C-alpha cells in the first residue's frame, strides 16, 4: 500500500511531471514526489462587494453572513445558506440548508423541526484519524 504524506500550510512554487511521478517544489520546505496528488485550497465567501451592510446584513471578520440556527441573517427576510453561511462548505450541508429554509413553505407543520445545530459534524479529527496526528 502506498504511503500518504499530508502537508498543511505549504505554498508550492512549481510542479513538474517526470518518470517517477509528479514533483512539487515547496521552496524552502523541500520537494515532494508522488504518483498522485490531491490539493485542497479551501474556500472563502464572496460577500465583500455585495454591500450587505446597506441591507442590514452583518458579516463576521472572514466575510461569512452572521446567522442563527434557522439560518436567519441579521436583516429581516434575509437568510444565509450555502457557502456564505459559515458552516462546513460541502454540497450535502448546502442541501440541508435548503431543507431548513424550504420546510416552512413545503411543510408548515414541520417548519420548526430542522435547525443547523442538529447536523452531525463530519470534521476531520486527529483523535479519530491517525494520519492527522503527524
Image (cartoon, rainbow, N blue to C red):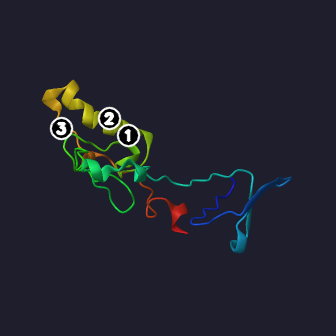
The answer to whether 1 appears left or right of 95 in the picture is right
Kindly state the secondary structure of the residue where label 1 is placed. Answer: helix
Q: How crowded is mark 2: few (under 14 residues within 10 Å), some or many (20 or more)?
A: some
Quickly name the residue at label 3: 113
- Asked if marks 2 and 1 touch (Cβ < 8 Å), the reply is yes
Quickly name the residue at label 2: 98
Q: For residue 70, what is the image quadrant?
A: top left
Kindly state the secondary structure of the residue where label 2 is placed. Answer: helix
Q: In this view, does 114 lie above or below 52?
A: above
Q: Which residue lies furthest to the left in this view?
A: 109
> Foreground mark, 2 or 3?
2
Mark 2 → mark 3, Cα distance in angstroms: 14 Å
Mark 2 → mark 1, Cα distance in angstroms: 6 Å
| Viewer-proximal residue among 85 and 39 | 85
x 27%, y 42%: residue: 79
The answer to whether 19 appears left or right of 45 in the picture is right
Quickly name the residue at label 1: 94
x 52%, y 63%: residue: 132
Q: Which residue lies furthest to the right in this view?
A: 19
Amino acid at each position: 500500500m502506498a504511503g500518504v504524506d499530508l502537508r498543511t500550510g505549504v505554498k508550492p512554487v512549481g510542479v513538474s511531471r517526470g518518470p517517477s511521478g509528479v514533483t512539487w517544489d515547496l521552496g524552502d520546505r523541500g520537494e515532494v514526489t508522488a504518483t498522485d496528488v490531491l490539493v485542497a485550497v479551501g474556500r472563502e465567501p464572496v460577500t465583500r462587494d455585495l454591500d450587505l451592510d446597506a441591507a442590514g446584513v452583518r458579516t463576521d471578520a472572514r466575510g461569512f453572513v452572521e446567522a442563527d440556527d434557522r439560518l436567519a441573517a441579521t436583516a429581516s427576510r434575509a437568510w444565509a445558506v450555502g457557502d456564505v453561511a459559515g458552516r462546513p462548505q460541502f454540497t450535502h450541508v448546502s442541501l440541508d440548508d435548503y431543507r431548513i429554509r424550504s420546510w416552512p413553505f413545503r411543510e408548515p407543520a414541520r417548519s420548526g423541526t430542522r435547525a443547523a445545530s442538529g447536523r452531525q459534524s463530519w470534521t476531520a479529527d486527529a483523535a479519530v484519524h491517525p494520519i492527522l496526528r503527524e
